Image (cartoon, rainbow, N blue to C red):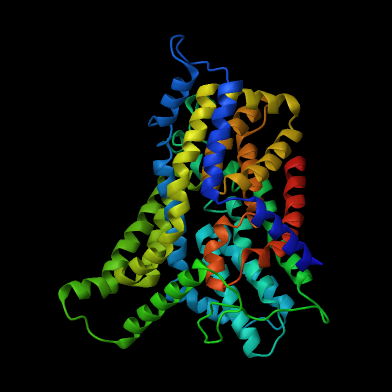
Amino acid sequence: MISRLGATISRVFERSAPDPFVLAVLLTLVTAVLALTLGTFPGKPDDQSRVLFLLDSWRADTGLWRFLTFGMQMCLILVTGHALAASKPVRGLIGVLAGAPWSGGSAAAMVGLVASVFGLINWGLGLIVGALLARDVGKSLESRGIRAHYPLLAAAGYMGLLVWHGGLSGSAPLTMTTRAGAEKVLPASVLERFGQGVPLRETLFSPMNLIAAAGVLVIIPVMLWLLSPGEGQEARGIGACLGDGRGPSASLGSASTDCDHAESGRAQAGARASSGAAPRTFPDWLHETPWLAWGLGLAFIAGAVRFASVSGLGRLGLNEINMAMLGLGLLMHASTSSYVRAVEDGARGCAGVILQFPLYAGIMALLVSSGLIDSFSRALAEAGNQSTIPLMTYLSAAVVNMFVPSGGGQWGIQGPIALDAGAAAGIEPGKMIMAVAYGDQLTNMLQPFWALPLLAITGVKAREIVGYTCVVMAAVGVWLGVLLVVF
């Protein structure tokens, strides 16, 4: 039944959902039309037309280019997590864990739990660790003659994206810890309400979010275990793009090329590292010596620790998390050349961020300049109360994520509306931030945009995992919705 449900859902999305960049373009056009027809234009000069006023707002530094810093921060989260996952210590841990499961159900549960734990640390790290672990567990189970359904393992490897926005790389809560960070996203009218920012003790480290994370870490492995095919049900073994000589079992297009490229790069890097050959020139020595990588890595770590000691853990932001991830990656790779190769491999995943974030910033500028953001905020505040507004924000964020598959981009668009509506209803900003964060992460299980690296590594197709991720999403969604009402 689950397999049939997954195939049905996948066919719907394959036939109706365009590329995420096209969605961003369409959303820009829809927002422009709504702004022209429904906007109040509070700041427009009397002698200027609506069209020119919107165009000037859209093209300005506070329009299209508002998220340049924010977009770079998002790229760094992805590539630093990817690079850390490719380091020898993490790959060694993956190798040890791969041999632990004793059944298909336990394998799916373990992969989902590990991917979720790493996803709470860093979403890029959770994504790549989950993908590598799913693939290696599939190999291990097959070599030991243990029956398992490989698409379910791949789905389990994607679970880090179901928890990430409530973790240490959550873009919405980390952006809001300081006024300087909030200024990169929020318009001045909303920013005025929040003084020096919202500390992490009110978002990531709040009792609500800690309970939410603990519950999700239980729900995910339990659901994956229950989804494992029983005796008499079809269970497909390990699939394509594994570099083991068995050949592909499905056509994967560019994903196969990416996977082959990544595997080839890792194999070549391993061969160079294991050859023991002495560097031939001084530049070669600089590239390969651990001292340079360790020195810079320790400097990054020291910078993050110094910030925490001066400003407190509650003020840690995206810059400090990225600084710590850069430091850990350099320490674990133990050479600048190895780290650079890993970053280059991960940087391919930043294309969507680079293309889409200017459009998201432009959409926010259209909403602000037309006055629609105030209208939406008032409508949301009037439609609910302190209990229902966070829940409504959460559900709407889940829908918006299908069209804006980026936590950072979505926060830029929806964050001002949510915070304004919450302030009008007397709701703490931390709860509204997490309502958007929970909704954003939830429908990642239906939106395959961020699954592309996992699909390339595991060799499965999106339609082969979405049925499983959808079921887990439903269980987690109920849990998070209940918490938003109770707290």
Say left or right for 234 vs 170.
right
Left or right relative to 481: residue 29: left
Q: Residue at x 40, y 48 (%)?
A: 72
- Of the pair 428 and 434, the residue shown nearer to us: 434
Hey, which residue is sitting farthest front in the picture?
15
Q: State the image coordinates of residue 219 (x, y, percent, origin top left).
A: 74, 61
Q: Quadrant of residue 144?
A: bottom right
Residue 341 seen in the figure: yes
70 to the left or right of 11: left
- Give me the residue at 42% from left, 73% from top: 261
For this orientation, the residue located farthest to the left is 281
Q: Position of residue 53 (x, y in %)?
A: 45, 20
Residue ranking furthest to the bottom: 144
Residue occupying the point 57% across, 17% down: 40
Is residue 326 or residue 25 the one in the foreground?
25
Q: Residue placed at 48% from the left, 22% from the top?
A: 51
- Please state, as top left, top right, bottom left or bottom right, where the C terminus lies in the image: top right
**Which quadrant of the figure has residue 404?**
top right
Q: Quadrant of residue 432?
A: top right
Q: Is residue 199 visible?
A: no
Quadrant occupied by the N terminus? bottom right
Residue 192 vs 266, above or below: the answer is above
Q: Residue 181: image x %, image y %?
A: 45, 39
**Is 23 rendered above or below residue 140?**
above
